[in-house]
Amino acid sequence: MSSATQTLEKLVSQASPSVAGEVEKPQVLVGIATCALAAGARDAMDAAKAALNGNDGVTLGQVGCVGCCSVEPLMEVRKPGEPPRLYVNVDAGRAAEIIRRDVMGGQPIPEWQIEAIEGLGTPAKGAATGAQDSEVIDRFTRDWRRLDYFSRQTRICLRNVGRVDPENIDDYLTVGGYAALAKCLGELSPQEVIDIIKAAGLRGRGGAGFPTGLKWQFTHNAPGETKYVVCNADEGDPGAFMDRSTLEGDPHSVVEALAICAYAIGAKRGFVYVRAEYPLAVQRLKLAIQQAEERGLLGDNILGTDHCFHLEIRLGAGAFVCGEETALMASIEGKRGMPRPRPPFPATSGLWGKPTNINNVETLANVPAIILLGADWYSSIGTEKSKGTKVFALAGNVVNTGLIEVPMGATLREVVFDIGGGIPGGRGFKAAQIGGPSGGCLPSQYLDTPTDYESLQAAGAIMGSGGLIVMDDTVCMVDIAKFFLTFTQDESCGKCTPCREGTKRMLEVLQRITAGSGEALDLERLRRLGAVAQRAALCGLGQTAPNPVLSTLRQFPDEYEAHIQEKRCPTAVCEALVHYFIVEDKCIGCGLCKRVCPVHCISGEARQPHVIGDDACVRCGACYERCPVDAIVRQ
């Protein structure tokens, strides 16, 4: 046993975990994360504390978000010798009642538990696979994780989220934390560490999918004594919250991974670049760094070895472009966050001109598990070219919104319908926007497409960072394209003409189309402008900005043609193209529509069919909402 491992074992023996490990007395765990706080988790925690009234025979603790955002706040009750119980939609009243009836009275409340939620609590059809079978990854698996929603997932990046108190390093140590770092420092050379990452097939989860081990190798081989490692936590995609949830629920996994990367490439200093809009993630990350320094897991002579690594946090101001690595480095250096041409690549000339390795949060969170369990284990999960798992943020028109982690290659159908629970209200699936503003929209014929890098690219989308927005049949795809282009155009740094001017002109075309002023040539203009930006924009964000427009043009041409040729929005979303008509046979002449019309464009006598003057109508929809007999049609 190496001296580094011996030092770590001493730390573990002295650890005082708050929620991790075996249950010796009743525990009440409340999920405290940004999403949970917005749903009222702090009130639930306060109510539980008041109900316990200082009872030291029960542990009240916090964990991160396990991903069931649609039924938060969550509260877990654990008792020795009993299966854990996960309660959902726990407001202050429920929290107090759970303490009174279950924790203190021994009477669980089945109707409030996750098993009672259709799609989440369905009994699992089979044993979990992949990482779920690993003793290290799933040592303290809760029984409720065997339910269908969780058993269909394979959690590596999110392995500790919901199992540890993110503000207590002893919890992380108890579940095997920093053992991978000790193994690297005591048993492996830097090159051997890199070889493991390369053999595992880990690819960057930030969007491009570049092989992580190869990136580490380039930085390792770069000459020079001064090198840097950087964690890109600048998560700016609309609907994406993978990095935030990981940092809020398991910050030490990222800290440990950065220390391992620094050892492998020969760096002594690193940065986590995280946006200031993530205050809870920043708070817990700061605490994790402080705790690691106090235990000798960061700083000088880590675990009694010669390895020294100092980690700092840099806050971003919310610029989407700073997710691009060269713009991110400029921001860390105190400059305006704008991309620069490559080469030179960061591996040879990064921060302050020194070799720099940059990985995003999800990529790094996989590293400790790979080091502990081996390259063969990790590469057995996923597909031939896309190894491991992928975390997706499910949002939009889907029943089970939240965070999931599935093996690479799981189909969109499995993600949206088996785990996501399908479309609310029995409506039809229309498309999935995958890859955020840089991705593409995939219609129903692509539901059986595997979620791996190659398959998604062939379908006209990209993996991106993992945002996945589900859309039902009420969504206008032209309006969706305009929404994403509005975002990327607004976030353009303005440095290069193809992005600055090209996205602006494309947005103007889309605005004309949705306002009813489109013309046939507009479709070719969009294609031509998009192609120029893809080829000539300076950075990857500008090059992929046209993707939502081009993919919707390709997959939903009929909707564009309806907007332009028929001056009609098929889903009645684009206000300027919506028309209201009164069905004569159904109108009872009550006059309610006439009284609520703000521009007085409805005419008709009492008890006689009324008429809407289309030219004067402002499309407010007041008459449509007020009609008691549904005689008004919107189309």
Image (cartoon, rainbow, N blue to C red):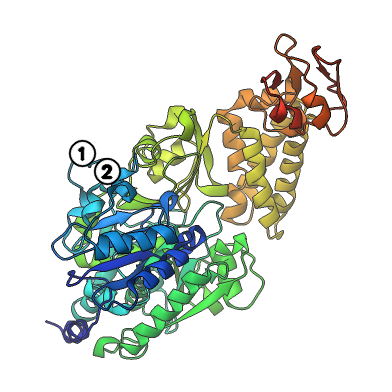
Give percent across and percent down for residue 88: 37, 53
Residue 172 sits in which quadrant?
A: bottom left
Q: Which residue has dot 1 on it?
A: 125
Does residue 523 sit above or below 268 in this rendering?
above
Q: Which residue has dot 2 on it?
A: 148
Q: Can residue 438 be seen in this view?
A: yes
Cα separation between marks 1 and 2: 7 Å
Nearer the observer, 53 or 516: 53
Which dot marks residue 179? none
Extreme top residue here?
585
Does residue 367 sit above or below 431 in this rendering?
below
Pointer 1 with pointer 2, Cβ within 8 A: yes
Give percent across and percent down for residue 615: 87, 24
Kindly identify the amino acid type of the residue bearing the numbered disc 1. Answer: Lys
The reply, left or right, for residue 152 in relation to residue 457 is left
Instruction: Tell me what residue is drawn at x 18 percent, y 69 percent.
Output: 23
Nearer the observer, 547 or 34: 34
Residue 367 sits in which quadrant?
A: bottom left
Nearer the observer, 453 or 354: 453
Give percent across and percent down for residue 221: 37, 73
Instruction: Answer few, some or many: residues within 10 Å of disc 2's Cα (few below 14, many 20 plus, some between 14 and 19).
Output: many
